[in-house]
Image (cartoon, rainbow, N blue to C red):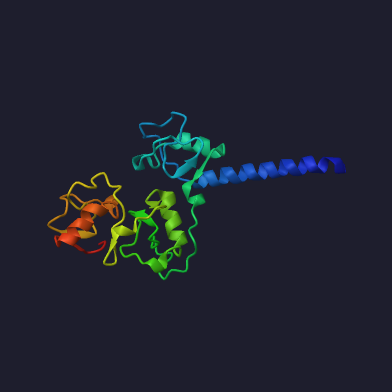
Amino acid sequence: MSLRFLPVFSALTFFLMMLFSVNATAQSIDFGNDSSEWANDGECDDPRFEGDEMAVILLDEDTKRDATDCRAAYQAGDIRLVSSSIDYGDDTSEWANDGECDDPRFSGAGMAATLLESDRGHDATDCRAGVERGDLRFDTAQNTSQRSDGIYFGDDSSEWANDGECDDPRFAGEGMAATLLDEDINRDASDCRAGVERGELRYKGVN
């Protein structure tokens, strides 16, 4: 082979390797289905992703429900998983690799029942897996006022937040909603905190 063709050959090889890498990663992502109201509109509505081809308004209910749009944008390099921009830290927590996220910077149905500040940034594998499944959210501006007496109340992202009843199934008492869903764990902070402070609720953890 002539030496003058080596730079072209090397550039082509690099391009093909990068293309193969993107496609291989895309195959490992569970994009879900196209059951979102906004599926097949040319924008990705799945909040697990970020980038230029994302919809302006993102809803948790569209997680894994805009597969065609998100797969196309991902393969084109126009979006990326939100998890790729998070510094997850390491796995030095005592509770690392147990299937639950113990890092208090996150919230959602995949969280451990008891969260400690000492585990901040130390349960990387569990927390990354939860974000990529769509079970967890990274709390970039974590509200430390949502902690009381060692209890992490989370945020107010539940559909039923701020309705005067606690919808988080980690609690029990007369101030609880009639129907409790695991998806509301750590997501009805204000109602549950108020109930605990009034003495109507107690923290029981996750069954």
Q: Quadrant of the C terminus?
A: bottom left
* Depth check, front residue: 101 or 207: 101
Q: Is residue 176 above or below residue 24?
A: below
* Depth check, front residue: 170 or 72: 170
The answer to whether 192 appears left or right of 112 in the picture is left
Q: Is residue 203 above or below residue 184?
A: below
Outermost residue on the top side: it is: 41
The answer to whether 107 appears left or right of 193 in the picture is right
Q: Is residue 162 above or below residue 120?
A: above
* Depth check, front residue: 57 or 131: 57
Q: Measured from the top left, where is residue 155 in percent x and y?
A: 31, 52
Q: Measured from the top left, where is residue 147 in percent x and y?
A: 30, 61
Q: Measured from the top left, where is residue 2 in percent x and y?
A: 87, 42
Outermost residue on the left side: it is: 174
Q: How many marks?
A: 0
- Where, by quadrant of the figure, is residue 48 drawn? top left
Residue at horizontal 26 percent and vertical 67 percent from the top: 149
Outermost residue on the right side: it is: 2
* Depth check, front residue: 148 or 46: 148
- Where, by quadrant of the figure, is residue 4 drawn? top right
Outermost residue on the bottom side: it is: 94
Q: Quadrant of the N terminus?
A: top right
Residue at horizontal 72 percent and vertical 40 percent from the top: 12
Residue at horizontal 46 percent and vertical 32 percent from the top: 43
Q: Measured from the top left, where is residue 101 in percent x and y?
A: 39, 60
Instruction: Kindly tell me whether residue 22 is visible in this rendering.
Output: yes
Instruction: Kindly tell me whether residue 201 is visible in this rendering.
Output: no
